[in-house]
Image (spheres, coloured by chain):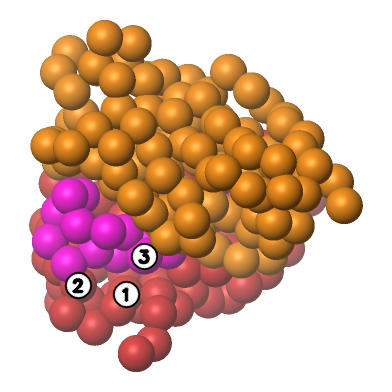
Chain colours: A orange, B red
Amino acid sequence: AQSVTQPDIHITVSEGASLELRCNYSYGATPYLFWYVQSPGQGLQLLLKYFSGDTLVQGIKGFEAEFKRSQSSFNLRKPSVHWSDAAEYFCAADNYGQNFVFGPGTRLSVLP
Amino acid sequence: EAGVVQSPRYKIIEKKQPVAFWCNPISGHNTLYWYLQNLGQGPELLIRYENEEAVDDSQLPKDRFSAERLKGVDSTLKIQPAELGDSAVYLCASSGQGSADTQYFGPGTRLTVL
């Protein structure tokens, strides 16, 4: 079955530190890949997406993600975390219009 | 430009009662989605519309859930009768054309079934 996994339920980093959130997918072919952020009391917002081409994708708010076909991964990174980045992060995949699936999410806490 | 509008924002009902949620997508968006999000989990797709056609409703529990998008614009999701396990946030999203386009999410309706 097609699935998206996020191995880390909760991550805590200090403000200014770098961040990497992991995402793995299990699909027959490389799906479209997405990262969304959900802040408390706010709706889900798209950070970035990958369809094809350059495997390093730039998004909003200083985030980037790298697609690695060999590892079936699409990890999200940010070089320096801000306190306002504390939120829930969801990786998602879509099989060309079929079976849009979200991962379980990773909750990010930021220490001052 | 207005975003995706959902109402009500909160709903508390007793089990076995019916409930309905309404969604108005971003103007011009042909694709509309309904998701269910349980606490601490990712959203789960219930149904996806392309205009007025439900193109993916494989995850919709059809014994108690129904949805419609009669004119290809706003949509209603209904539960009848509600069960305790239906307590969750129901999210609506829309995109221009298909899932390759960015999905824009509404604030959700938080349902509590007592």
Instruction: Specify whether residue B111 is in view.
Output: no
The range drawn in magenta is: B85-105
How far is disc 2 from disc 1 in space, using C-alphas? Answer: 7 Å
- The residue that appears at 24% across and 83% down in the rendered structure is B27
Q: Amino acid at mark 3?
A: Tyr
Amino acid type at circle 1 is: Pro
Quadrant where the N terminus of chain B is found in the figure: bottom left
In the image, which disc is placed on residue B104?
A: 3
Circles 2, 1 touching at the beta carbon (< 8 Å): yes
Label at residue B29: 2
Which of disc 3 and disc 2 is earlier in sequence?
2
- Can you identify the residue that label 1 sits on? B25
C-beta proximity under 8 Å, tags 1 and 3: no
Q: Amino acid at mark 2?
A: His
Find out whether residue B49 is within the magenta segment: no
Please tell me whether mark 1 or mark 3 is closer to you in this view.
3
CB-based contact (under 8 Å), mark 2 and mark 3 = yes
Residue drawn at 37 percent across, 20 percent down: A73
Mark drawn on residue A112: none
- Left or right? Give the position of B32 relative to A40: left
Secondary structure at numbered mark 2: loop
* Residue A71 spot, x, y in % from top left: 33, 11
Dot 1 or dot 3, earlier in sequence: 1
